[in-house]
Every structure is written in C-alpha cells, then in structure tokens.
Amino acid sequence: MSNDSLRLDRWLWFTRFYKTRTAASAAVNGGHVRVNGERARAATSVRIGDAVQLVRQQSTYELTVIGMPARRGPAKDAQACYDESEASVTRREKQLAELRRDRLQMPMTRGKPDKHTRRQLRDRKGR
C-alpha cells in the first residue's frame, strides 16, 4: 500500500472519529460520509487534499485531509491528519449549546421520573 492514500474506513478509524473500524465502515455504508461531495464506500481511497463531510452523533464535520496516519495512535497525532473548517466548528458548537439549553429546560428528577414528570416529558415531546 502506498503512503499517499488510505481506505476511507481505516482513515476514519485511525483519526479517531470512530472507536472501531467496523463502526466506521457501517457509518460509511449508511451514507453518513461523503468524499469530495459524493457518497463514498468503505473501500474508497482517501488522498491528501480530499474534502470529507461526516455526520456523527447529529453533528456535521467538514474536514480536509492533510495527512495519512500510519497507525491508530494518540489523539494529537490523529488531529494532525485533518483540518476542520471554521464554519463547521462554529456550527457544531452552536448546536451543542442549543442541546444543553434544551436539556436544562427539561423537568428534573432524582432517579426514575414519577407519574407527573412522565406526563410533562410526554407533553414536551408532543405525544
């Protein structure tokens, strides 16, 4: 294998976006990953300069490949292999702040919700 390209599922696993290569492959096959704007397969070769769009845990990442890792190493080494756009970072942080704000507005209980709290939760969900 050459050093200028790597399978997409391996690259996602090496760069620590997924804990296992199987999870990375499942995400790619599920249509959550695009390379250069096109839906990719797990065996798609990723090269330096490629644009990768990734949806993980309701968050969208827009990455540019700037390196090929030799192995799944420390997080610092993994982060050196890609560059994330500023728009992507700000969009993710804004979305995370909205989720936190929504969770603070939910009724709180210690442990299992009681009958009254379950009704409030159902009403909030619209069921």
Image: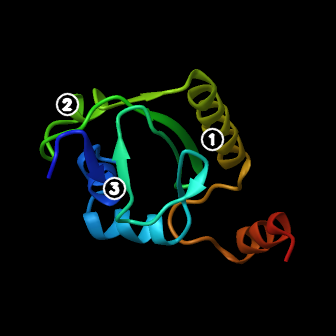
Q: How many marks?
A: 3
Cα distance, mark 2 to mark 1?
A: 30 Å
Q: Quadrant of residue 126?
A: bottom right
Residue drawn at the location 56% of the way across and 66% of the way down:
31
Task: Answer yes or no: is residue 58 visible.
Answer: no
Please tell me whether mark 1 sits on a helix, a strand or a loop.
helix
Tell me the tag on residue 100.
Answer: 1
Kind of residue sitting beneath label 2: Asp
Q: Nearer the viewer, residue 58 or 8?
A: 8
Please tell me whether mark 3 sits on a helix, a strand or a loop.
loop
Q: Can you say whether 85 is above or below 59 in the image?
A: above
Q: Mark 2: few, some, or many residues within 10 Å (few <14, many ≥20)? A: some
Instruction: Report the residue marked by disc 2.
Output: 77
Please tell me whether mark 2 sits on a helix, a strand or a loop.
helix
Kind of residue sitting beneath label 3: Tyr
Q: Can you say whether 60 is above or below 26 in the image?
A: above
Q: Quadrant of residue 89?
A: top right
Q: Quadrant of residue 92?
A: top right
Cα distance, mark 1 to mark 3?
A: 23 Å
Q: Mark 3: few, some, or many residues within 10 Å (few <14, many ≥20)? A: some
| Earlier sequence position, callout 1 versus callout 3 | 3
Residue 66 point in image, percent of width and height: 34, 28
Residue drawn at the location 82% of the way across and 63% of the way down:
124
Instruction: Report the residue marked by disc 3.
Output: 18
Residue 103 is left or right of residue 127, and the answer is left
Quadrant location of the C terminus in the rendered image: bottom right
